[in-house]
Image (cartoon, rainbow, N blue to C red):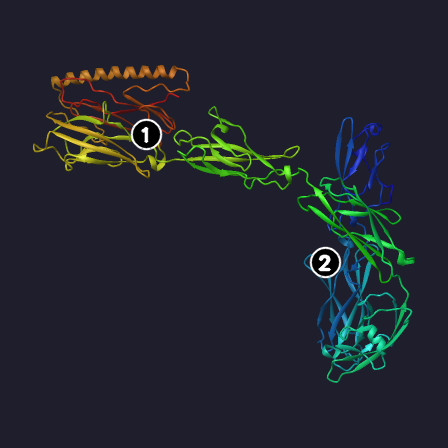
Amino acid sequence: MKVGSVVSNLATDLRLDVKTLTKRKMRIDLIANKKYLEVNKDTGELFVAERIDRETLCPKMLSSCFLKLEVILENPVRIFNIEIEILDINDNAPQFRRDVIHLDVSESTPIGERFSLSNAVDPDVGINTVTTYYLGESEHFTLEVQTSRDGSKLADLILEKALDRERQAVYNLILTAVDGGTPPGSGTASVIVQVLDTNDNAPVFEKAVYTVRIQENSPVGSLVINLNASDLDEGSNSDVTYSYSLYTSEKAQETFNLNAKTGEITVKGVLNYEDYKIYDMEIIATDKGVNSLSGQCTVKIIVEDMNDNHPEISIKSFQSPVSEDIEVDTVIAVVSVSDKDSGDNGEVDLHIPRHMPFKLRQSSDNYYELVVSEALDREKVPEYDITFTVTDRGSPPLSDNETMTLELLDVNDNVPQFPQSFYTIRVQENNAPGALLGSLTAFDPDLHENQYLVYFILEKETANTSMSMLFSINPENGNLYALKTFDYEIEKEFLFHIEARDSGSPPLSSNVTVHIIIVDQNDNAPVIVSPWRAHGSVVDEKIPRSTDKGSLVAKVIALDIDSVHNSRISYQFLQVTDATLFSLDQYNGEIRTMRMFSYRDPRYQQLVVVAKDNGQPSLSATVTIKLSTVETAVKAYADMTEVPLEYDIFSDLNLYLVIGLGSVSFLLLITILVTIVLKCQKPKSSKVPPPSRNSVISERNSTIADSTLVSNDAYWYSMFLAETRKGKLVVRQPMPKGSRYIVSSIPRGTGGTNTSDSAPSTLQKSDCK
């Protein structure tokens, strides 16, 4: 579209009041290097401000091309994002990558042989791109057009008629590419087919006489002329060597060097226009065939008076070092150039190396400014060696150069970086205070104070305890230390953040998460909670001599507040009066009779039971049970698996005993219920009340002094054992995780019976929170 053409009326499209556009400072911001479009604030029309070239905006061959812009209004501020699709027109003709395509074809090539040709490219898209190829008239070759997988058109040259080198050695064909536009565009390329043959042709120079002009101060090694004698043969028959003939003067041979392989004539000695102005020499080209053939030519070299002064560079100003955040287009150097020669020999050009974030800008005649063209980054390139090269336009051109080093000053533009975003550190409990836990070192690519890092623990309180009271970090190297000894049974893990801050102005920082995991050690011995021991570690129990085989005599219960395998307990007899009379279950601590008592068995039996945990090394606790057998009709404890109640006719004495025990049990139950209700009504306190002398209170993952224990098992069992005259009842009840338990050792009532002096331990569950 022509400049000034209206694309759209933004006021209408965006439903804006045309009268307020100027007041609201309507403007557009194109997301491109050029401002192709502009808006008329009086009418709201969007018009073309600069000619639009789709191929410049979208260099890649994309099916769609959009020009993005923003329409900005003030009072109130509104921003509209607009995309304008640029439609392609056939304004580009197909073009070959090479104007001349060379093909070497032996005259023995069979008919029908294919030769791939370079395809043409067209920056247009769709129908406007290349659609077909045409080949100029030829009786030996035809053209076949194919379509590739991506839809582009390819051309193959096909031999239709046998070649004869003696008739024609080279075929010049015209290849034409045509697009599908209206009108269609086209591009051409020359296809030169070289026919290879045997050694039946002598080398031939392009000219019989070559006239070359060379300036007087050409340096040694300068190229004078590159002779090219062509041989229509192939292989070794076409390899040509060059030499001087006998008619070439010795002065010419001393002044110029002839390369026997390439035919290049270069300066060998010093040229002086006043001494010799013209050198005549005869050059012979000989091929390497079996029957070698040769050709010759005459070379006339004319020495000219030339530009013998080098251009000069003068650095007028150079600013170094500079800050790495220097703005683009800032001038950092001023350079002047000069040449004492005249004409083209006195015209000079100044250059700097490519791929540098700088450019030269001519300020006046022979004065140039070196400006920053891209943003600089000291962390990528700390300094630049900038070489100014000045070259005149003489033939051959002369040049001079000057190198300056530009140093970059560091700016605090990089935050410290930790190699990991999350650190997990495992610490064995009972560690020594001040132990090194690990090193958390960050890296900052800046320099000097911008690189000096200081490490902090970000404050975070856990259970009214600050992290800085538990851990310490070396502010210089990031070494993390423990300030106290950790107990797994109290604290199992900590989660906090470490911050690394540089010393720049302003300082930059980053943080990392640290997860401290306390690893359990076997530092707690098992504690026997049943049977209850009032004093010392000896328990007196009574058992009827009529106890059946397999009856439960006693049950040892031990608890270990360690975790996992360290809290797994096994039971063993350490000492037993008669090993054939009692058995001990190593897993649940039940002591049972292996047979019935006989009159030979002593009245008193002593059992020493040891409870060991599974730690390394193992810790243990022992209990001594003194059993005394009594003559009574009441059976021993029943098997834990037995459920039924057995009744018999009560005797008067046993009836009174049952009534007394029932009364005491009822009063005890009422007392326990009242105590539980009172505790549930009390407000929640951070401190746990001291346990009673005859009870053990335990909550999972809690720590209570004296006879309080911590359990890590998933389930506890509550066991209620009630005895009757002829029967017994055992109930096993699973307890959920996290419940509160009361383990009480309830003394039996005193009476004229032969029962034991202490009741079995009772494990109760309380739902108080």
**What SS does tag 1 mark?**
loop
Measured from the top left, where is residue 67 in percent x and y?
Answer: 77, 42
Q: Is residue 213 left or right of residue 570?
A: right
The residue pinned by badge 2 equals 152
Q: Is residue 600 left or right of residue 392?
A: left
**Nearer to us in this view, 550 or 697:** 697
On the rendered image, what quadrant is the N terminus found in?
top right
**Nearer to us in this view, 109 or 249:** 249
Please tell me the numbered disc located at residue 428: none
Q: Is residue 216 left or right of residue 114?
A: right
Residue 124 visible in the shown view: yes
At 90% from the left and 67% from the top, the residue drawn is 304
Amino acid type, residue under disc 2 in the picture: Ser
Measured from the top left, where is residue 460 in percent x and y?
Answer: 52, 28
178 w.r.t. 9: above or below: below
- Outermost residue, bottom side: 291
At 14% from the left and 37% from the top, the residue drawn is 580
On the rendered image, what quadrant is the C terminus found in?
top left
**Foreground tag (2 vs 1):** 1
The residue pinned by badge 1 equals 716
125 w.r.t. 38: above or below: below
Q: Residues within 10 Å of mark 1 (few under 14, many from 20)?
A: many
Amino acid type, residue under disc 1 in the picture: Trp
Is label 2 in contact with label 1 (beta carbons under 8 Å)?
no
